[in-house]
Structures are given as structure tokens and as C-alpha cells.
Image (tube, rainbow, N blue to C red):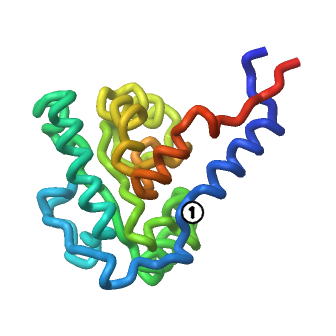
Amino acid sequence: TGRLDEKTWSAMVATFQARRPTGQRRGASTDLVLAPSDDFFDRSRPLSLRFVDRQAHDAYQRMCQAAREALGDEALSSHGLKIVSAYRSPSYQAALRRRSPRAGRATLAVNSPHFTGRALDLFVGGDPVSTADWNRRRQVDTPLYRWLARHAHRFGFVPYFYEPWHWEYRGEESAARQAAPSELVEVDTP
């Protein structure tokens, strides 16, 4: 039929979620580096919110350079691929939940991949982190997002299926395995 049934969608979501990094491996101070303010969408972002896992940051910088070479400087101007959010401590995330208990999914995350310092919210266009359907549609249609979807795994990043701006660093080998066609789930059609 070309439509996903609920059982298939649930299986896909379970697979996506199982592969995500979680706060179980919290970013240790030796794993985190202070990223320069130029890497961020908001250059005045407080120091405590500018930490990134060392390997993820190195890969992020290589990925930005490759995107610039492929798409040109203009595609990355106006905040393209700038970090909107990176490491968040569990206490910071808890404070967000207390301040806005009815806010979006990121605010409600109790075991956020951002605790690892390996999850980066990147500006790909549209509203940086709005989960509104119109915004997600707009974001997945941008050249930056399409480039990331095709190439981010080469740098160790995989997308979070629900948020076009959210990319999780797994390491080049792990991300490449996840992107490999052999790991795609076969769906039986009636």
C-alpha cells in the first residue's frame, strides 16, 4: 500500500531509540572540550552550555568543512550548521523541565543524549528547534539537511528521526555500519 502500519512504525521507532546514546555514559570532564563561541548559533551562549565531547567536536569541524566544500560558503552563512545546543548537564535539563513542564520533548528528556556531549542540535534552517510539523518539513527540504542526511555518517553522526536538527555522534565506524543498506529493516508487504 505504500503506507506504514502501526506495527511497522513501532518496530522502526524501537530500533531507532535502541541505537541512541543515552545519559548512561555521561560526558566526563576529560571527554568534554569548550567549543569556541563561533561554533554556536548564539555566540553569547554561556560557557557552561558550550561543552562538546572532544571526538564529536573534531568530527563536527571536519563535517562543516566538507559541507562548505560541497555546498559553498554561502550555504553555511547565516548560521548554517552552527550548534544550537550541545552538552547539557542532568541538573540543567531538570531545571528546564521544572521551568516548562509542558514544553517539547527535549525539555522533558530525563535521560537525554545531550548528557554525553555527543548530541548536537545543528541549525539546518527554519526555526532551530520547533517540533511543529511545518517546521520539520521545511528543515528536511533544505540543502544543508539533505547534505547531512547523505554524508553525516562519514563523520560519525546519525540523525534522530524525529528532530531534523538533532545529530548524535557515534564514531565513524559505528555510524557507517548504521547507514549501511545491509542493516535496513525489510518490510513485508501484503
Q: At 76% from the left edge and 44% from the top edge, which residue is drawn?
A: 11
Residue under the image location 17 percent in, 43 percent down: 65
The foreground one among 46 and 156 is 156
The image shows residue 126 at horizontal and vertical percentages of: 33, 37
In the rendered image, the quadrant that contains the N terminus is: top right
Q: Position of residue 182 (x, y in %)?
A: 62, 35
Q: From this view, report whether residue 39 is shown above or below residue 13.
A: below
Front one among 111 and 98: 111
Q: Is residue 188 above or below residue 123?
A: above
- The residue nearer to you, when weighing 158 against 76, is 158
Please give the residue where the numbered disc 1 appears in the rendered image. 102
Extreme residue in the top direction: 1
From the top left corner, tell me how far across and down residue 125 is, in percent.
30, 37
In the foreground, 157 or 133: 157
Q: Residue at x 83, y 20 (%)?
A: 189
Q: Is residue 133 left or right of residue 51?
A: right
Residue 90 relative to residue 52: left or right = right
Is 102 rendered above or below residue 32?
above
Identify which amino acid the numbered label 1 is placed on.
Arg
